[in-house]
Image (tube, grey):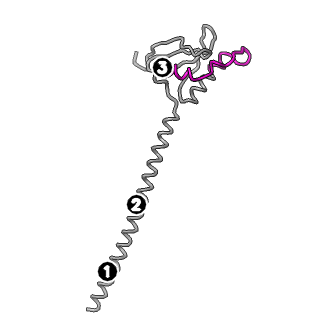
Amino acid sequence: MGQLRSELMETEAELVAAGNSVSTLEDQLSIRDSQLRYQKLELEKRQQELQAARPRHFNSLEELKTWLTSDDTDQMQYSSDEFNCISFALMLQDRALADGYILSTEVLPVAAHWANIAVIGDRIYLIEPQDDSVILEQKINRGEPG
């Protein structure tokens, strides 16, 4: 009988130790879950920041015109030696990129004059960077088989 009681006490002690281990593991799991939730939120935040930082095309002609109105590149003073048409086009392109937009530059072969190009949907728009006028609109084929 004494041996049975001793084994019973030993088994109870093992159960208490196992219960403590389970409790410790549950606490660790809870901490890991919290850390995982935090890391998931941080990842989502970084993905949103990355998406916001990625330049994009203008969504509409209205958005392009609104942006051009807010930009003051067209207010710069022209100088054939120091700030000419390519300077205007490159400045407008740089400022568009800083604001998260894609705006390219192009030299017009007929006039040897630099301008900017915006792609909006299936249209391209030629922009005169010295006065913000949109001087050409052309429908384009965006990769459709010909």
Percent position (x, y) of residue 10? Answer: 33, 83
Residue shown at the point (40%, 61%) measured from the top left: 29
CA gap, disc 2 to disc 3?
51 Å
Give the number of the mark in front: 2 or 3.
3
Amino acid at circle 2: Ser
| Residue in the foreground of this view, choosing between 49 and 63 | 63
Residue 12 — which label? 1
Residue located beneath label 2 in the image? 30
CA gap, disc 2 to disc 1?
27 Å
Percent position (x, y) of residue 2? Answer: 28, 92
Check disc 2 and report its element: helix, strand or loop. Answer: helix
Locate the N terminus by quadrant: bottom left
Left or right: 91 with respect to 102? right
* Label 3, residues with CA under 10 Å away: few <14, some 14-19, many ≥20: few
Amino acid at circle 1: Glu
Amino acid at circle 3: Glu
* Label 2, residues with CA under 10 Å away: few <14, some 14-19, many ≥20: few
Residue 75 lies within the magenta run: yes
Left or right: 90 with respect to 41? right
Residue shown at the point (52%, 19%) measured from the top left: 65
User: Which range is magenta?
Assistant: 63-89
Check disc 1 and report its element: helix, strand or loop. Answer: helix
Check disc 3 and report its element: helix, strand or loop. Answer: helix
Give the number of the mark in front: 2 or 1.
2
Percent position (x, y) of residue 79? Answer: 72, 15
Q: First in sequence, mark 1 or 3: give its number.
A: 1
* Label 1, residues with CA under 10 Å away: few <14, some 14-19, many ≥20: few
